[in-house]
Structures are given as C-alpha cells and as structure tokens.
Image: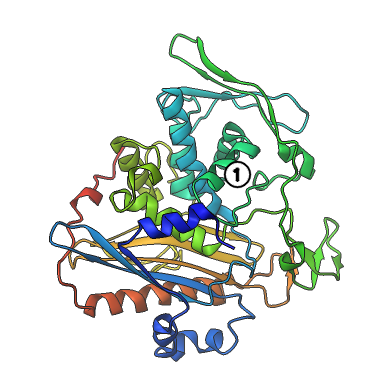
C-alpha cells in the first residue's frame, strides 16, 4: 500500500506519466530475438525487471516523462549490490551541507569496537587525507566498497534508512557495510567520526551510533532465493538463501531517485534533494566520468579497469569498448550474488537524445551462491549492452516536438 506522502508526491508530479507494465519494452525485446529471446522465453528465471523513461521537452526545456515498465515488481527481490552507493553519496552531501562543512574537509573515521576500521589517511587523494568528496569520487568512478562503508558510518544505519523513508522511497532497506564479514549486529553500530580543519582542529564530531531496531524484510519469505550456498571451506550446502537481512532498493525507488537527482526542476522545491548547484555539478561530473579520466584518484595502474568499467548500458562494462564520443551516461551500477544492475540516464549531445533506463537481471544458472560461477559475461553484460543499443536506436528515431538543451551536462573531465 502506498503511503499518503507517496500519493501526494505522485499528484505533484503532474508532468510524469507512468505506463505501468505496458508492452513498449516487451515489443523492443521481442523485436530483437537474437539478443533477448533466451530471456523473454523465461523472464522469471532471470528475475528480469526494466524501467525505461522517455523524456520530452517543451519550448522552455521543461521535461515531461513517460515511463514504461517490464515485469517491475517490488515483491520480486533482487540484491541491489553497489546501486545503494548513489543514495549514500547524495545523502552524505545533504548531511554536510546541513552541518555547513565543505565536502573537501578532512574526514576521519575512528573506531570504538574490534570490528570497526579506523581511517585517518587516503593515499588516493592529492593531499593524502580522506574526505567526503574523495569517497564520493571513488564510489562514482569505480564503485569503491570501502568508500561506501565510510559514508554508511557517517550517515548511521538508523538515519540512513529514516531519511530515505522520509523522502518517499518505498521498500528501501540499507542494513550493512559492503564486502565485510561481520555479524549482523555490528552493522547496527557505526563508527565515531570527525571533521578536522587545515589547522588540525576538530570542527565537528559524531559519537558512535547504534540502531536499536534491527532492520529486516517485512516479508522474509519473498527474499528466499536459490538452491544452495558455498561455505568458507568450499563445500556447497544445499538450501535456499534468505536475503531478509540484506539491503533492498526496489527498481522503482532507484529509478525515482535518479530522476529526482537529474531533474530537480521537475520536482516541487520541498521534494528536491538539499543540494546546491555545485553539488549537482560535482555528482553529474563523476557519475558520467570514465575512471581513466581521473588523476586523483588514479586507476592507470589497474589493468582490470577500462573506461567503460562502470558503464553497463550500451557498453556492457567491456574494457575494450569503443566509446561513442557524443554519449555520456550518468549512472550507478552494481553486481553481486549473480545480480547485475544499472540505473542510468543516457545522453547523446550530438543527436539530442536522452532517456532513462533502470534494469536488473539475475545471472546464476546453477543457483548456488558464493561459488563465483555467475554468468555475468555470457548473459548479464550482453543483456545490458544490447538493451542500451536497442533503446538508443529507438530514441534516435522517436519524434520529439522540441530538442533538449543539455549544455548543463557538459564537463571538462580533468582534475
């Protein structure tokens, strides 16, 4: 059941048209059987969900949205992986704005429990010091897990979730740090942190936070997936796995979050993120930048990272992908437990094309978790590459009464 606030928000967004579960995406998929037939023949096996938003502009460049859905179901669980990091980045900027602290200020993570990690330096930064700014750069450029964990600790588990609910994002559940093997209870505790100025003075300190209320799925049965799991000794234990205490970020919530971030003028002032113009430019720049364009942090020494490392739509994350010089993709991807995701706003500056697409696919043929046998390369990445190609081609031919002015999204990508 939708909350009253959610219904009011939908009423306010009169420039948005949602064509729930229509056939537009299905028709695009079925018109390209060589790409998608193996998926459309059994979409439930791949837990396939897609949202595609067409964007039209009026004479004053104001956007109108028409959103098409394919199998979108908030009750069909998928693990959101690194897509949660975009929310953490935005909310961290909101929080330091409220504190009136610059995002480049030295941010130190302290420890109060054996499971916690103290972080006082960051060798990836030009000055060798950690900051909210540097953590967000690393999240948006290469989806850095430790950078997310520091923001999770800054936000605190309780307030992180409370803030998302207050903004009207339904079904969201952020319960844990990423890529850490610690008990559930330890994620309810978050580190003491502090900001330090250039003179070495502490300008703001936050004590360790503890969320007394453990967060879990309202209906845990809906999060049970798979047939087995490989334990630390390499033995497969045959039983389904419950994700009831894991993160959740439903597709509609992800799509709405990105829309609110990329199109603030389309929302009532009270519903916009509490960001300033420089915050938006900072986020847009690093959401659309390639890691190979960054100097601090630099990823030139990592042979596994190519320009399209975090660009699944159109490029499939291919290290050797031929990049379209007219295109920039403002997005956040994720991959874990066989789930592959992209939440993207696509722009072609030359042809004046723009659209949004958010999708998830499950690539785990043997349905065993933690065995590192996930079909990302054979199923997942090709799906995203071809989905981007098909929607892009469709958008190139779609009539538009007014071409968009996208100049505010053009950046010089150099540090």
Identity of the residue drawn at 12% across and 61% down: 59
State which quarter of the image contains the N terminus.
Answer: bottom right
Question: Could one spot residue 104 in this view of the protein?
Answer: yes
State which quarter of the image contains the C terminus.
Answer: top left
Quadrant of the image occupied by residue 276: top left
Q: In this view, does 176 lie above or below 322?
A: above
Other residues around mark 1 within 10 Å, as few (<14) / some (14–19) / many (≥20):
some
Residue nearest the viewer, comparing 356 with 182: 356
Residue tagged 1: 161
Identity of the residue drawn at 43% across and 48% down: 141
Q: Is residue 149 left or right of residue 57?
A: right
Identity of the residue drawn at 65% across and 26% down: 118
Whole-percent x, y for residue 95 in the image? 48, 32
Quadrant of the image occupied by residue 298: top left
Q: Is residue 323 above or below residue 157?
A: below
Q: Is mark 1 on a helix, strand or loop?
A: helix
Whole-percent x, y for residue 45 in the image? 64, 80
């Amino acid at each position: 059941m939708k909350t009253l606030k959610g219904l009011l928000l939908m009423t306010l967004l009169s420039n948005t048209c949602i064509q729930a579960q229509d056939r537009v995406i299905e028709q695009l998929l079925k018109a390209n059987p060589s790409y998608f037939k193996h998926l459309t023949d059994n979409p439930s096996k791949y837990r396939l969900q897609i949202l595609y938003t067409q964007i039209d502009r009026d004479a004053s460049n104001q956007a109108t949205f028409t959103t098409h859905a394919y199998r979108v179901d908030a009750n069909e669980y998928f693990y959101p992986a690194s897509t949660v990091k975009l929310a953490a980045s935005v909310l961290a900027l909101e929080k330091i704005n409220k504190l009136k602290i610059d995002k480049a200020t030295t941010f130190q993570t302290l420890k109060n429990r054996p499971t916690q990690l103290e972080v006082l330096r960051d060798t990836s930064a030009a000055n060798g010091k950690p900051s909210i700014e540097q953590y967000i750069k690393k999240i948006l450029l290469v989806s850095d897990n430790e950078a997310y964990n520091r923001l999770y600790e800054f936000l605190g588990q309780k307030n992180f979730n409370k803030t998302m609910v207050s903004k009207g994002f339904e079904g969201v559940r952020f319960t844990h740090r990423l890529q850490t093997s610690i008990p559930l209870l330890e994620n309810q505790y978050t580190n003491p942190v502090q900001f330090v100025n250039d003179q070495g003075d502490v300008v703001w300190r936050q004590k360790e936070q503890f969320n007394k209320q453990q967060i879990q799925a309202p209906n845990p049965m809906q999060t049970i997936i798979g047939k087995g799991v490989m334990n630390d000794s390499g033995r497969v234990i045959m039983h389904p796995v419950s994700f009831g205490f894991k993160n959740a970020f439903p597709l509609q919530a992800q799509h709405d979050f990105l829309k609110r971030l990329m199109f603030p003028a389309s929302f009532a002032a009270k519903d916009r993120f509490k960001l300033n113009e420089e915050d938006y430019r900072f986020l847009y720049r690093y959401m659309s930048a390639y890691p190979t364009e960054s100097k601090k942090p630099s990823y030139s020494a990592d042979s596994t990272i190519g320009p399209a490392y975090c660009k699944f739509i159109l490029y499939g994350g291919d290290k050797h992908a031929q990049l379209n010089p007219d295109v920039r993709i403002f997005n956040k991807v994720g991959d874990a437990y066989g789930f592959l995701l992209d939440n993207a706003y696509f722009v072609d500056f030359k042809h004046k094309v723009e659209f949004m697409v958010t999708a998830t696919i499950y690539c785990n043929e043997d349905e065993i978790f933690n065995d590192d046998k996930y079909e990302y390369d054979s199923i997942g990445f090709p799906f995203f590459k071809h989905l981007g190609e098909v929607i892009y081609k469709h958008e190139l031919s779609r009539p538009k009464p007014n071409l968009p002015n996208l100049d505010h999204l053009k950046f010089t990508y150099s540090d």
